[in-house]
Amino acid sequence: MRFDELDSKLRVYETAYDFSVPPNIYLVARIDGRSFTRLTKEKHPFDRPFDERFRDMMVETTKHLMQCGFKIVYGYTESDEISLLFDFHEDAFSRKPRKYNSILAGEASAKFSLLLGDIGAFDCRISQLPRPEDVINYFRWRHEDAHRNSLNAHCYWMLREQGKSSAEATKAISGKSVAFKNQLLFENGVNFNNIPAWQKRGVGLYWTNSEKTGWNPVKQEETVTTRKTIAVDLDLPMGAQYNRFVASLVNK
């Protein structure tokens, strides 16, 4: 059988279940670390509960994804996950989720592995959101998840440092209220309100215009040019203010 015949006969098995997301639907990708608990606890023991080196690796990975061929208007990272909001009119690869998932998972895995010096793998899934308020709610969801995880992590590792086993520390905070956990930290000298914002709210990345001064050798004068750069926000707002912040990016 000739190549052309093989190609037409077998390629259909790759594309039989392909579909494209219709226009006027917002696309958000969530890229998650695979088996990162083992990777960051056993193979590479980062500081607990949070490590600036790991944070910076995730930020650099997010930056890379925002510049790897898709139009991304907002990147958000907390813990070992990254969320990306695509431009409303993005139509790369005919808006096929299969392509978005495979490319973003591969790019994230490659970039993070280079930064870590070891294999760090990610998976990816695409959310198709019909309304701007769904996009706002999505990022508010991940924002709230960051806060919950941060509070639990600070309580858990404080108890571990006091000699509790993993099971004992988990049991001590399981099912307990936010007020209980805040009080537990406070009684042990930790005011959760004073913990760095990025640990509680994650990190936001978005495009901004910046000016750069250069030299025009023809006119023999300084020139100022404007270019787009990625801003990294370690102090994201909370609550309704965060909703408005995300809304301003959705409506650009």
Image (tube, grey):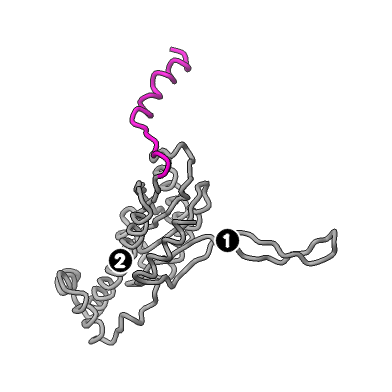
Magenta run includes residue 77: no
Label 2 sits on a secondary structure element that is helix
Magenta extent? 1-24
Q: Based on the displayed image, in which of its 4 quarters is residue 197 positioned?
A: bottom left
Magenta run includes residue 21: yes
Q: Residue 208: image x %, image y %? A: 56, 62
Q: Is residue 104 above or below residue 117?
A: above
Locate the N terminus by quadrant. top left
Which residue, given by chain and number where applicable, does mark 2 sit on?
144
Nearest the eye: 141 or 162: 141
User: Could you tell me if residue 18 is visible in this image?
Assistant: yes
Amino acid type at mark 1: Thr
Badge 2 crowding class, 10 Å Cα cut-off, few under 14, some 14 to 19, many 20 or more, is some
Q: CA distance from mark 2 to mark 1?
A: 27 Å
- Residue in view at x 78 percent, y 64 percent: 215
In primary-sequence order, the first of circles 2 and 1 is: 2
Q: Residue 175: image x %, image y %? A: 15, 69
- Residue in view at x 35 percent, y 67 percent: 45
Q: Is residue 115 above or below residue 17?
A: below
